[in-house]
Image (cartoon, rainbow, N blue to C red):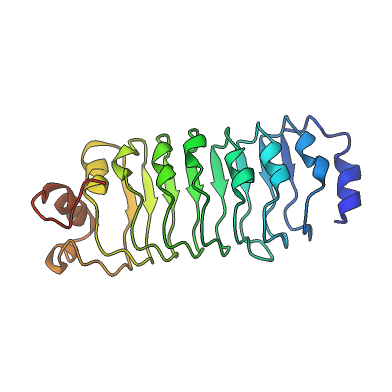
Amino acid sequence: MELQSLIHQLHDAHEAKGINLARNHLTSLPQDFGKFQQCQELILDGNPMPYLEDVVGRIKTLQMLSVERMKEPLRAFPENTFGGLRALVVLRAAHNTIAVLPDVFKFLVHMEFLDLTSNVLSWLPPSLMHCKKLKVLLVSRNKLTELVKGFSNFHDLHTLDVSHNKLERLSRGMGRLVTFYKLKNHDLSNNPWVMPPPEIQEQGEPKMLEFSYNNKQHTSLILL
C-alpha cells in the first residue's frame, strides 16, 4: 500500500479502535498517524520497517501493538516511542533482530503479555520488574545470559519461556513463583545450566525450580 493511499483510507477513521496494516510494504507511517487517539490495537506485522517511529508513541490509548516478523526486521524501539505507550497491555515483537530494549518499562505498568521470541537480546532492562501485572513472558531463542532482577515480583506470571538462551543459573525468584504463585507453564530447555547441578537437571524442570528456591545456602542462587 502506498503511503498516500494509507493516509486517504484512514482519513475518516480517526475513531478506529483497531488498525491492521500487516504486510503492506510500509517503510514508514505518516506524521499525522498519532491523531488516531481512539486506537487500541495496531498491527504492523510483516512490513519493511526496521525502526518504529515516534508517531506511534503518540497514540496514548494503544493497548496492543504487534510488530512480528517484519519484512525488514525491527532492530530497536526508540525510547520516546516506547515510553509513551503507557496503556500498553500486549506487545508482540517476535522474529526480529532487536538487540536492546529501552529501559522505560517503569511507565508500562499495565503490561500483561510480552513476546520477544527469536530476537538477539543479551539482557532485559531492569525496569521490567515494574511490570507487576505481567502474565506471559516469551523470550526464547535470544542470547540472554541472565534474567531481570526482581523476578520474584511477577506474582501474576503463569507462562514463561526462556528456552534456547545462554542462561547458566536459575534464580530463587523463579522457584518462588512456582512454589507460592501462579507460574505453571515454563520452558527452561536448551540453556547451558550450571546451577542447579546436573543431577537435579536430570529430574526435570519442576525439580530444578524446587531446588532453586529451597537451596538457600548456595551462593550462586540469589533471590531475584
At 63% from the left edge and 53% from the top edge, which residue is drawn?
67
How far from the left and from the top, in percent, is residue 82? 59, 44
Q: How many marks?
A: 0
Q: Position of residue 44 (x, y in %)?
A: 70, 51
Q: Position of residue 183 (x, y in %)?
A: 31, 43
Towards the viewer: 84 or 183: 84
Q: In this image, 99 relative to 186: left or right?
A: right
| Residue 95: % across, % down | 56, 62
Query: Going by the picture, which residue comes out furthest to the left?
Result: 217
Residue drawn at 70 percent across, 43 percent down? 56
- On screen, residue 102 above or below 167: above
User: Is residue 14 placed above or below 117 in the rendered structure?
Assistant: above
In the depicted view, which residue is nearer to us: 120 or 9? 120
Q: Quadrant of the N terminus?
A: bottom right
Position of 222 with respect to 54 (left or right) is left
Compared with residue 39, is residue 104 higher up or lower down, i.e. above or below?
Answer: below
Q: Residue at x 58, y 32 (%)?
A: 87
Q: Residue at x 39, y 62 (%)?
A: 144
Left/right placement of residue 140 relative to residue 189 reads: right
